[in-house]
Image (tube, rainbow, N blue to C red):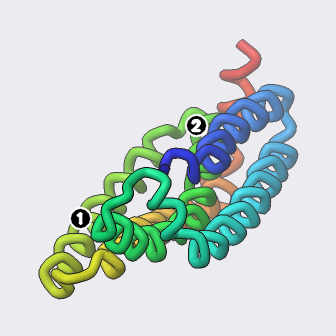
Amino acid sequence: MISLFFLVPSSMLSTVSALSAQNIGAGKHERASQTLLCAMSITVSYGIIISVLMQFLGGSAVHLFSDNADVVRLGSQYLHSYIWDAIFAGIHFCFSGYFCAYGLSGISFMHNLAAIICARIPIAYLASRQYPDTLFPMGFAAPAGSFLSVIICTGAFMWMKHGKHAEKLFTTSRQTNHD
């Protein structure tokens, strides 16, 4: 079920990567940035809509997969907090596509690693220890990790656009893509 909720954000990663790479190859770096921002608008809008809907339909969604009352109750608790990740993951997925278009996939690896180590695992662990009777707090580990990724990605994007190496990066990617 979670995979279904992330179809739009996941597809935007590929879309941003492909469209940005085409624009980068044409030397249209500003258009690549516009592609990123447009895709983020789409994923954030989708994330807000699906997150709000699941606040009302979470139990019914979980019930599609199990008739067990405990599974539905606990799954619904988890989904009510986890689903907010659709907003933040959509943003960092778009950033990852953008970074990959520039050949900077290492940024994507690093922000995901940081999110797992600094947020997702510790928050899920602490929530399981502090709130053993509910999965609601544990569900917030994913959006917290994605929020950390968004912060890291925003910093990397600003470095790309305004850092002292920005001109070299854009010139190098243009030469690489034309060879």
Residue identified by numbered label 1: 121
- Of residue 166 and residue 5, the one placed in the foreground of this image is 5
Dot 2 crowding, Cα within 10 Å, few <14, some 14–19, many 20+: many
Residue drawn at the location 37% of the way across and 58% of the way down: 67
Q: Amino acid at mark 1?
A: Ile
| Helix, strand or loop at mark 1 | helix
- Of residue 120 and residue 109, the one placed in the foreground of this image is 120
Report x, y in % for residue 91. 62, 59
Q: Could you say which quadrant of the image residue 29 lies in?
A: top right
The numbered disc on residue 100 is 2
- In the visual, does 66 lie left or right of 37? left
- In the visual, does 83 lie left or right of 22? left
- In the visual, does 30 lie left or right of 2? right
Q: Amino acid at mark 2?
A: Cys
Dot 1 crowding, Cα within 10 Å, few <14, some 14–19, many 20+: some
- Of residue 37 and residue 163, the one placed in the foreground of this image is 37
Distance from the alpha carbon under mark 1 to that under mark 2? 26 Å
- In the visual, does 23 lie left or right of 124? right
- Of residue 104 and residue 142, the one placed in the foreground of this image is 142
Report x, y in % for residue 107. 47, 48
One can see residue 179 in this view = yes
| Helix, strand or loop at mark 2 | helix
Residue drawn at the location 56% of the way across and 46% of the way down: 4
